[in-house]
Image (spheres, rainbow, N blue to C red):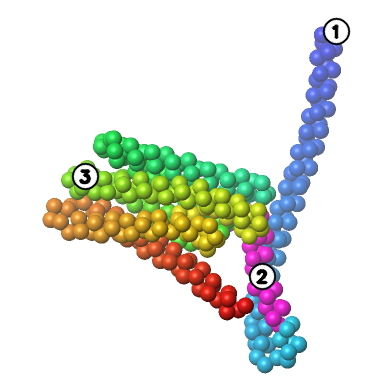
Amino acid sequence: MSKNLKNILEEWKGLEEEYQQLQETHRMYLKKLDELSKLQNSCSSSISHQRKRLNEISQLVKKSSKGPSEEDAKILDEMKEKIKNRPNAFFQMEAFLPKKNGLYLSLVLGNVNVTLFNKQSKFAYKDEYEKFKLYLTVILLLFSFISYFFVSYRLSDVILNFLLVWYYCTLTIRESILITNGSRIKGWWVFHHYISAVLSGVMLTWPEGNLYHIFRNQFLAYSLYQSFVQCLQCYYQSGCLYRLRALGERHNMDLTVEGFQSWMWKGLTFLLPFLFFGHFWQLFNGLSLFRMAQLPECKEWQVSVCGLCFLILFAGNFFTTVAVVRQKLKSRNQKPKSL
């Protein structure tokens, strides 16, 4: 046997040993996957059972709360506190368990499991979502600025509206995945992205004409201002969330939003005038479009639909923000009384 062939056989023998080891590792991996699947199903069924039993015991506690002794009342109060905190514990557990996709994700992605099973992956996906939002907002800000001041071609408007449609559709998908993985986003701040996607889509289909050109600069100025405010929010909310997470006051999967939430009360109230101005601009856009729809020369259905979308955005944004501010002011007024 030649020396060259002998060296080749030795290399092959070493490779065969590594392959056998790889097969064994892969077999163990498949076994662990099977065990993991069984543990996940066991946890999910146990949580469902716990929820059912918790509701039953909660009803019994309510019935026993009528006229108990002082000692019994103390025990019942402790039990009520534990019952109150238990759903949050279930929520934290379910964030690491596979679950069925909601209607929207099922329509878009099908029955694909989008649950991330470790904290690093969840946080990395959340961080990527925040970066995506910031980068696209800056691009939209620049594009709106160029379209408003320097370019007046229909093609540039189409590109801007297409970007807006893609941006909001992508946000809704990413937010649905983040909610599946434990992010707590208030309902309206998710739903208003669906309305914004519809609004951008309708603007994209609005044919060029006299009415379109009348509203064009108003819409571009609004888009420019909205992108500017969103940049402010992304920057300041990210810093605030980082600080609150370090203090243990916020969850790791909490996100920045295009609005105002209770955790922003300390340090971010200076954003409120910017937000309210944007809300009333949405109202102004909606009323302007409805006035335009009453003109005899108005034949485009896009005018009324865009006006309706703007009014829905104003109502949702304005009343949600007012509710948050009112709740915080009420809680602040109640604290001195309790002391």
| In the foreground, 230 or 29 | 230
Residue 337 x, y percent position in the rendering: 57, 79
Does residue 35 appear to the left or right of 173 in the view shown? Answer: right
Residue 146: where, in percent of width, then height?
33, 37
Say whether marks 1 and 2 touch (CB < 8 Å).
no
Q: Residue 3 carries which label?
A: 1
Residue type, label 1: Lys
> Residue 255, how many percent across, how many down?
54, 53
CA–CA distance in space, label 3 to label 1: 83 Å
Q: How crowded is mark 2: few (under 14 residues within 10 Å), some or many (20 or more)?
A: few
**Is 80 part of what is drawn in magenta?**
yes
**SS state under label 3:** helix
- Extent of the magenta region: 76-102
**Mark 1 packing: few (<14 Cα in 10 Å), some, or many (20+)?**
few
Would you place residue 184 above or below residue 213 in this image?
Answer: below
Closest to the observer, 297 or 224: 224
Name the residue: 54% across, 71% down: 332
Q: In which quarter of the image is the N terminus?
A: top right
Front residue of this view, candidates 213 and 264: 264
Give me the residue at 17% from left, 53% from top.
298
Q: Is residue 164 visible?
A: yes
The alpha-carbon separation of the residues under discs 1 and 2 comes to 73 Å
SS state under label 1: helix
Q: For this view, does 294 lie left or right of residue 312? A: left
Q: Which of marks 1 and 2 is nearer the N terminus?
A: 1
Amino acid at pointer 3:
His
Quadrant position of the C terminus in the picture: bottom right
The picture places residue 296, in percent across and down from the top left corner, at 12, 56
Q: Name the residue under label 2.
A: 85
